[in-house]
Structure formats: structure tokens, C-alpha cells
Image (spheres, rainbow, N blue to C red):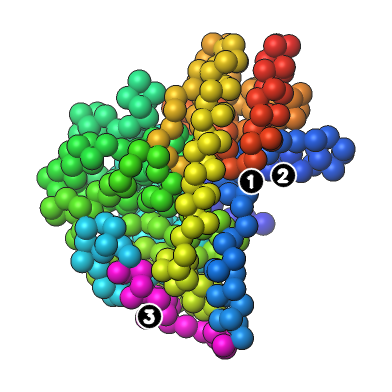
Amino acid sequence: MKFAERMSRLGTETAFEVLAKAKGLEAQGKHIVHLEIGEPDFDTPKNIRESAKKAIDDGWTHYGPSAGLPHVRDVIAEELSKTRGIEATRENIVITPGGKPIMFFALMALLGEGDEAIYPNPGFPIYESVINFSGAKAVPIPLREEKGFGIDVDELRSLVTPKTKVLIVNSPANPTGGVLAKEDLREIAKIAVENDLIVMSDEIYSRINYKGKFESITQFEGMPERTFILEGLTKTYSMTGWRVGYGYFPLPLAAAMTKLMTNCNSCTTSFNQIAAIEALTGDQTEVENMVAAFKERKDIIVNGLNKIDGISCKDPEGAFYVFPNIKETGKSSKFLQDYLLEQGGVASLAGTSFGAFGEGYLRFSYANSVENIQEALSRIENALGKL
């Protein structure tokens, strides 16, 4: 079968490939500690589950508007207005099946041949994949450990050309756990305004933030009208399988997103949208407990990794990932990913799964139990000791 040329430009997400390989080893009787997949190990909070069950019984099982149920969009607009310093209405909000359609639809609507888009590297691999798929040029802004895996504003400025149309920022970040400082966001906003750039702000980990108050680039003058926010329930509320994402968009882009939703998905599941109201407005105790547990696990894995010869690990400020430096082992990221899986029984991801600037690093997700993290640390130390 002959595919269109653009399919050759479409990348993938290595986490699912490593997960499949790990599952294959488990089928052969090998015990694997899973630190590769970015998914909370907690159940969805009970109040949200009960809300969805009731919504089904109440008849929320039919088509809804492509942009999302109006009263749910009102709730999301109120939440984003309160937490992002913007004046959002339901017209700015589109609800999608998960967060990925927000970046896919919006980038496909905005980018074309001859355009350029700047994206963080190492970063979520789908950024680069979708930019390439659109026909635009993907321009990486390196996230360096010595800069706390933040964006070097001067380097960013040097990458902007007359062809640059879109800039992607992600804070808290996958895979590094880095959080952009308010002053850096302010300078990035100035660059966007001066160069008439559209900014995609991936804020899916906004609530899993150990640094303090979450800061969005939308708070700065000139940004609400040139920024779209990627948000959703998947990470914060442990609702990965529910597929409920939502975004804030300037009005023209919201209209384009709605049209793409009509063409591709029709709408997002209605009873899941009703459950989203409970997620955003209901009791937040379980969410707060999850974040507290992530912080405890973060401290354990960071301290443990820093005790292993050949590894050094910065303390991340958000999300639920660590991105340790493994350069002193003398081995490549891909080699250690495979070695630790096959010889150590620990599933991780090579830093290069997140871009070329991830060489020399591994990503571990600490969205797992303390016991499993401690077991993984022991296995990693033993495996590296045999190299």
C-alpha cells in the first residue's frame, strides 16, 4: 500500500513502544517495574466516577456540540479566567477527546509549507511530529540542564526568523519537570509580541507544581489574543482513559478548532464532560493527596538516583518525571534504556525519545508506588554495577 508522503514525516511516542516491549517481557515471566509511562497510578477520584455514572443514567449519552456542552465550557472558562488572569468566555473554549487534538488541530490550522515553529527539545515528542506533519519546519530550542531545563531567552530570540509563526512552551515540562520562571515567561511574551508569534502554552501539568503558584504566559499584556492553552483532566485527576482535554483559544482559532472537531470527532463524550464539572468544581482532597504523594516519591527517586555512581539528577519543580544525567556511565541513552529494561527489569525512556538534545539522559516517571520506586532504584544500581 502506498501512503501519502506526509506520513513519512509523522513521528511517534516511544513510551507506548517501550510499554509494549515491557509487557512482552512480562508475558515471558519477567517482573518489570514500570517507570516509562506518564500516567498516574491512582484511580480517578470517587466523586468524579460517581458523577459520570449519574450522567449516564440522566441521559447524557447523545451527541453534543462539537465545541463542547455550553454549560461545561462555562465552567472551564470560569476556571481558566480565575487561574490564568484572562477574561475567557465559553466562546474561547473547545473541549476535545484528550489534550493531543488541541495541539494537532491547532498546529494543522496554523502551520503550512514555508512556516517555522519553535518547540522545546527535549520535549513532548508529538510537538515535533505534528510540526513536521504540517509541512512546516520544526526549530528546536534546547533545554539545558545548566539552565534548569528552562528556556534561554537570548537563544530563543536568535532562533526567531521572519518565517517563525508558532512558539511552543511547556511548563511544568515533560520530560524534565522544569518550570519556567515568571521573569522568563515575561521575556518570552515580549519576544512573541514583538515578532507577532502565536504561542501554544502546554499547561497540562499546571496543578502538579511543587514550586508554588502556577504561572501562565497568558498573564502578560498582548498574550491572551495570541496564545492558546492546552489543558485537560488526564494528569491532574488521573483520568487518562477518559479522554477529556480542553483549550482556551482566541476566537478565530476557536472557530477553526470547532470545525476540525466536527470533521474528525464530531464531539467529546457527553457524560465525560458532565464529570468534568465535578472534577473542576467538586472536592479537591484526592487531587491534593495525589500531588502530595508525587512530591514524596519525587524526593525518594531524586535522592536515590543521586547515590548511584554515574548518575546525577536535578530536583524537578513540577510534573511527575525526573530526567537524570547518565553521561558519566559512558553509555548512550538508548543503550541504557534497553539495558535497564532487559537486564535490570526497569522500564524507562531514553532522553532521545524527546529529541536530540535529550542524549545523555533518561526519563523516569515516578507515578508509581514508593515500594516500586525503591525496588527500581536497587535494580538500577545493581545493573549499572555490572557494566
Three-letter amino acid code of the residue under disc 2: Ala
Whether residues under marks 1 and 2 lie with C-beta atoms below 8 angstroms apart, the answer is yes
- N-terminal of the pair, mark 3 or mark 2, is 2
Any magenta on residue 59? Answer: yes
| Magenta residues, start to end | 58-78
Compared with 108, 188 (above or below) is above
Residue 5 on image: x %, y %: 51, 51
Residue 294 on image: x %, y %: 52, 41
Residue mark closest to the camera, 3 vs 1: 3
Number of the label disc, if any, that sits on residue 16: 1
- How far apart marks 3 and 2 lie (CA) works out to 39 Å
* Number of residues whose C-alpha sits closer than 10 Å to that of mark 1, classed few (under 14), some (14–19) or many (20 or more): few
Tell me if 116 is positioned left or right of 237 in this view: left
Tell me if 265 is positioned left or right of 220 in this view: right
Any magenta on residue 168? Answer: no
Q: Name the residue under label 2.
A: 20
